[in-house]
Image (cartoon, rainbow, N blue to C red):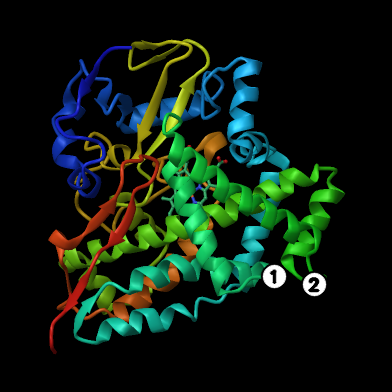
Amino acid sequence: MNAFVPLETSIFAPDFTLDPYPWLEDLYYRDDVLGFSSEGMNFCFRYQDCRDLISAHKNVSREPPDTSDSDMAAFAEKYPARAWGFQYLLTDMKAKAILARFIQEMLNRISLEQFKSVFQSFEKPGVHSEYLRDLSHLPMKSIMQAWGFRYDDKLIDDHYEYSVALVKSFDNYGEDSLMAAGDAGMAENIRYCREQFNSAEPGTLLHDFAREIRASGIEDDYGVGCLVSLVQSTPNTLSISNTLMLRNMLRYRDKVSVLREDPSLVCADVITEFLRRDNHVKALARQVHDDFKLRGSALRRGDSLYIFYPGVNLDPTHWDNPLELSFDRQFTHDNHNIFGGSRYSCIGSRIALKYFSELVPLILEYLPVTAEVSSEDIRVEGDWITERVITNLPILVPEH
Ligand code: HEM
């Protein structure tokens, strides 16, 4: 594969994670460039290329690199939970559709009341860093409550750690210690979800979900796989996207002032615009299973590349003034890829829209207009690529 030019920084550099646009700005307009390379990996970053890759899922997919049966058996022996995941995590479209319906029902039942005290704490002058922990834990707690999972605070803490361990290992096949830690966390998650699936209390969503999976003739493990996806995806996705949203509320004060004046303007398009500007998803791998042409360049069977989602969401050939938060944008099902698409559509998009539609007005109510993000103190952890983990994003609230 050629036409991947070296990125002038590392894909892992915190500055690039937090503001990638300056490094990509000129590349968008170069006809000779298909993507960029960094740390030995190739990345596509344009809107149209992302659409082409996603819709070509018969040639280019997320499935692991082509491996012989014996390679796969060796992989499964070393990382049994991940191997189980390849088989059962959202691979059955009928089970995925049932999950989507139950997610909708969960959203009808969910209570986000617990978040209020987190944002109320912003009213106090000082430096706020502690909110990140609450934002990492409360989404899962509210989801587990609504489904009728049995849990306690320790379990929520543990599953947050499993989720982070999995994120660190995701698509980092060469990193043995990350892979082993991710696999161990996922094994616990599978064990827990299987137990919940098999012993759900009558009257809970969980119970109805298990019944419906079985009534549809779907093997139990595909149902368990749905729950595993939900439990492992919730903590990082919502907490990091929420943190980045807070940062942008304070960076783009003027734009956000219209929402402060009239919080009823907060709607799905507004939330989608916040997520377009920045969210937790960074790069997701694709494997080429059959020869395929992208932007005129040949991708060959066995090639591996990544979709760099922040590049896609900021592509100036698709978005006017891409760095600006603009609440006039109208999103339709086929003019953006913020939540992926086709076979890899996000199962959490409705959760995210519901959460943030409720949380943004609360944040606007309690976050003083004079608050600031202390940019030099933002910490982005580690060198894994799928999502980046923000471990510190202090908010400074001056004395009123
Ligand atoms: C916060 C905003 C969110 C954004 C911007 C987002 C974005 C995305 C994107 C771009 C993909 C496609 C991945 C690919 O190309 O391979 C995806 C897939 C996925 N998302 Fe989200 N997501 C969000 C929230 C969530 C939440 C809250 C959950 C929790 C349930 C979730 C669970 C998933 C799962 C399980 C997949 C994989 C779907 C599959 O493989 O079939 N996401 N998401």
- Can residue 251 be seen here? The reply is yes
Residue on which the image places disc 2: 203
In the image, residue 342 above or below residue 96? above
In percent of the image, x 20 and y 15: which residue is there? 32
What's under tag 2, amino acid-wise?
Gly
Residue toward you, 29 or 367: 367
Residue on which the image places disc 1: 148
Marks 2 and 1 in Cβ contact (< 8 Å): yes
Image coordinates of residue 332 in percent, x first then y, are 44, 47
User: Which quadrant holds residue 29?
Assistant: top left
What's under tag 1, amino acid-wise?
Gly
In percent of the image, x 50 and y 53: which residue is there? 163
| 208 sits left or right of 189 in the view | right
User: Which quadrant holds residue 336?
Assistant: top left
2 or 1: mark nearer the eye: 1
| 382 sits left or right of 350 in the view | left
Image coordinates of residue 240 in percent, x first then y, are 36, 58
Residue toward you, 20 or 386: 386
In percent of the image, x 30 and y 31: which residue is there? 46
